[in-house]
Each structure stands twice: as structure tokens, then as C-alpha cells.
Image: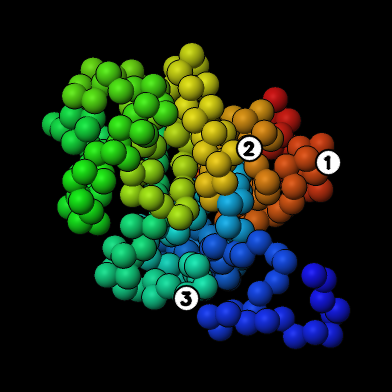
Amino acid sequence: TPTTPDTPATTGAGKAKTDETPVLLSVRHLSKSYGDHEVLHDVSFDVPEGGVVVLLGPSGSGKSTLIRCLNGLETIQGGDIIFDGSPVDTSSEKEWRRLRNSIGMVFQSYDLFPNLTVAENIRLAPLKVQKRPKADVERQMDALLKDVRLTEYRNAYPRELSGGQKQRIAIVRALAMNPRLMLFDEVTASLDPEMVREVLELMLRLAGRHMTMIVVTHELEFARRVADTVMFLDDGTILERGSAHDFFTDPRTDRARGFLESMA
Ligand code: ADP
Ligand code: MG
């Protein structure tokens, strides 16, 4: 039933309930420097639960650095990261280790362990880090492999897979941790064109299942389809943020317009 604006929101677990989708990740005034080179400057944004944020920007604008800051792979010089309602102690490696159970990440280079089979790659962290029961992990792995149509590669080694297959396994490996948030940094950038599509289609399916994702990509057609929100990063600053439709049809800044033209 609708409430009048004057009615206080009912509270549960100390949080005001609203009709809005909850925010999963909140970044406030984040800054990151290498030496005296400030690479990220006062970056603030929210990612709602189930939302897909696509991060675009020219090479060197700070996209990878931002993604790495969100996974604790870089120390930050200022700002706050709030994950699932709790401020992250960004200086604590222990806290990041805990958070990496909830934040999956896939990079451009296939980072599968070459000496382990596909199955061993996938179940390693769920078993060793999350200490989940083997039967449970196996069941989930079977379902994930089936979903990406790679069941028959279960006992293969990464070198026996194509680039596109390796990236799908890398994504599956991250998903096997049951992450709340997935970070993707140019995961198709080193793939042959014919393999790009199978990886992008998997990411589109994940978005369709309401996986919360931050995606760095140069595939603009895909970006337009997958994004709820586009953020355009330029020289370490978020210059534009808005719906994919608005960004692609009518970018507000010359920098974004120039970027889109350069990619066309
Ligand atoms: P993008 O992913 O958008 O291409 P990056 O985040 O990789 O951009 O880089 C942003 C800036 O930070 C660039 O100027 C780059 O040279 C610099 N940079 C990235 N990593 C390092 C590092 N480890 N040490 C020093 N400078 C770095
Ligand atoms: Mg990069």
C-alpha cells in the first residue's frame, strides 16, 4: 500500500526501507595516485543491486585502476567504499580477502592456472577459501559448465581451450564463488573476433539474471545493450554518467562525443 510522504519509512535491520532498489556498492570521493600522478580524482558513484554499469573512456583514463581499487588490488589515497551497507576498511588486507569472496573479477588476460584442469580451476577457491562442501561445489560447477556449454572440457587443461573458452571458464570460476558483484575489465580485448560474441553473450545472460556488474569494454554495441548506466571516465574523472540511451544518442561533453566518434 502506498504511504504518504510524511509517513516515516518502516525500518528493518536499522535500514530505512524505500521503494528504491538497494545500493550494493557506493564509492565516494575516491582518489588514487601513483607517486605524484593522480590517476583517479574525486570519483563517486553508486551501483544498485542488480544494476549493470558500463565504464567507458579512452586508454589511460583510469578504468583499470578504478576496477582494481574496487577489489583491493590497489591502495587508495582518499575516499570511501561502502559495500552492501558497510564501509570498507580499505587499508585492511584481511577485509579485502573477505570481500573478494563477494566480488568476482575477470581480466583481459586469461588468468586460469595453467597446471590445473578446468574443473580444478573452478573448484579451487570455493573449496579452499570458502570451505564449502565438495558435493555442493561439484553440483554448482556442473550446472555452470552446462550453462556455458563446456561440460566436455571439464578435465581439459587451459592450453587445450580457445581464448573464448578460456574467458568463459574464467567467468565461471568467478561465478562459482557466488559473488554479489562482478567486475569485468576488457575481457574480450585479446580475443579473435569470432570468439568475442560467445563471451559477450554470456555477460548479457548474466545481466539478464540480474547479476550486479561493472563492465569495462570497448564493444560499444554490447555496451549499449548491457548497460543500465554508462559512466564516461576521462583523465581520472567521471565526466558523464547517465543512461546508455542518453550517452550514446546525445553525449553532453565534447570529450565523450570525440570518444564515440573515435570508436565508430
Ligand atoms: P585505462 O584502463 O583506462 O587504460 P589505467 O587505469 O590502466 O587506464 O591507467 C590510468 C593511468 O594510470 C595511466 O596514466 C597509467 O599510465 C597509470 N598507471 C596505471 N598503472 C600504473 C602503475 N602501476 N604505476 C604507475 N602508473 C600507472
Ligand atoms: Mg585498462
Q: Which of 23 and 186 is in front in this view?
A: 23
Q: Is mark 2 within 8 Å of ligand 2?
A: no
Q: How far apart are marks 1 and 3 (CA)?
A: 35 Å
The colour style of the image is rainbow
Q: Which of 42 and 204 is in front in this view?
A: 204
Q: Residues within 10 Å of mark 1 (few under 14, many from 20)?
A: few
Q: What x and y, as percent, mark residue 71?
A: 40, 57
Residue 231 percent across, percent down from the top left = 65, 50
Left or right of 246? Residue 96 is: left
SS under mark 1: loop
Q: Residue 250 carries which label?
A: 1
Image quarter of residue 146: top left
**Residue plotted at (53% across, 27% down):** 201
Q: Which is nearer the N-term, disc 1 or disc 3?
A: 3
| Residue carrying label 3 | 87
Query: Which mark is on residue 48?
Result: none
Quick one: SS at disc 3? strand
The kind of residue on which mark 3 rests is Pro
Name the front one of labels 1 and 2.
2
